[in-house]
Image (spheres, helix red, strand yellow):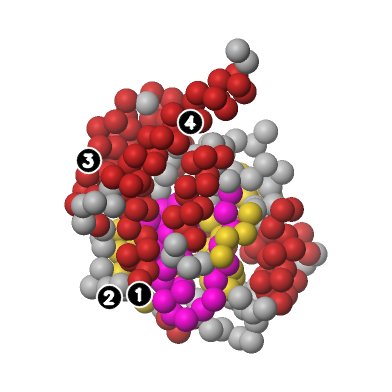
Amino acid sequence: MSTPWIKAFLAYPLEAFAVAFCHYGLKIPSLDTASDLGGAVLRRLGPLCPPLERRALLNLEKAFPEKNQKELREITEGMWDNFGRVVAEYSHLRKLAVSWDPSRITVSGREYLREGSQPSLFFTAHYANWEVAALAIMHEGLPLMQVYRSAENPLVNHMIRRAQRQIGDTLIPSGRAGAKQLLEALRQKTAVLMLLDQRKKNGLPVPFFGYPALTAPAIGRLALRHKCPLIPVQVLRLGRTSRFEVRFFPPLPLPQQGSSQERLLVLMTAVNQHIEAWVRERSDLWFWVHNRWKLS
C-alpha cells in the first residue's frame, strides 16, 4: 500500500481519533486542570519524539549560541509544557470567549486598536496561546477575520477550525484561496489577524535572529497599499498557568522612501524584530520545531 493510502486510511483517522478523544475528554475538567494536565503530558512525551526535539534544539543553538545544552533543554521542556497547555485549552476556547474574565486575561495597549480611518491589520506568532489574541481583539469590539494555514490531516484540520469558529471570528484560508475574502474584509473595515512566524515557501527572506527566514509578505503589502495600521499583538502566558497578558503595541511606521520592494523589506524586518523580541523575552513560549530558517 502506497504512503498516501496509508495516511488516508490509517494514519489520519488514528491521529484524528486521538485528537478528538483529547479534545472532548478535556472539556470535562476545569480550564486550569485541563491546562495543567496537557502541560504535564507533553512535558513528558514531547522529548520522546526525537526528530522534533532534535530540530528544536538545533534551532535554539542557532538562535542562542551562548547558551549551554542544559539551558537549551530547559527551554524545550517549557516549550512542550506550553504546547500541551495550548492543546488542552482549545477545549475551553468558547468558555474563555463567552465568560471574559479580566483576572485571567489582562490587556494593555487598547489605545492602539482604532488608529486612523482604515481597518487594522494585526500580527502575532505561535507563542503562548496565540488564540487568546483573537479573543482580546473581539472583546474590544472589533469584528475580526483570522487567516489560517490548514493542517496536513484534513480531519484534524476540521476539528481545529471548528474549535476556532466557536470563539466567533471568521476564518480565511491563507494563499490565493482566501485573497478575495481578505480584500473584502478590508473593504468592510473588518480587522484581520495573521500569524507570521512560520516559513513561507516563496516568501521574502527577512532577518530573524540574524539569519534570513522566508516570511509571508502579504500583510506588509496590504498595509502599504491600503495604508492600514499594522499592529503587533503579543500574548504572554503568566508562569505555567492558563492566565495571560495581551499586549497591543503601537502600529509599525509605514516606510515612505525607496521602491515598493525596499519599503516592504523594511516593514517585514520590523515585523520579525517584534517577534524575535517576544521570543527572547520568553523563549519557552515559542514553538521551536518550526523549520524556520530553511531557504529551499
- The numbered mark, 4 or 3, whose residue comes first in the sequence reads 4
- The residue that disc 1 covers is 107
- The residue that disc 4 covers is 13
Say which of 199 and 277 sits in front. 199
Of marks 1 and 3, the one in the foreground: 3
- Specify the quadrant that holds the C terminus: top right
Distance, label 3 to label 2, CA atoms, is 26 Å
Identify the magenta region: 124-149
User: Which residue occupies 39% across, 41% down?
Assistant: 20
Circle 4: is it few (<14), some (14-19), or many (20+) Cα within 10 Å? some
Q: Position of residue 265 (x, y in %)?
A: 68, 58
- The numbered mark, 4 or 2, whose residue comes first in the sequence reads 4
- Specify the quadrant that holds the N terminus: top right
Q: How many marks?
A: 4
Q: Position of residue 85 (x, y in %)?
A: 30, 49
Residue 281 in view (yes/no): no
Please indicate whether residue 293 sits to the left or right of residue 73 in the image: right
Q: Amino acid at mark 1?
A: Val
Distance, label 4 to label 3, CA atoms, is 25 Å
User: Which residue occupies 56% across, 20% down?
Assistant: 6
For label 4, the SS is helix
Are the residues at dot 2 and dot 1 in contact (C-beta closer than 8 Å)?
A: yes
Q: Amino acid at mark 4?
A: Pro
Mark on residue 40? 3
Q: Is residue 142 magenta?
A: yes
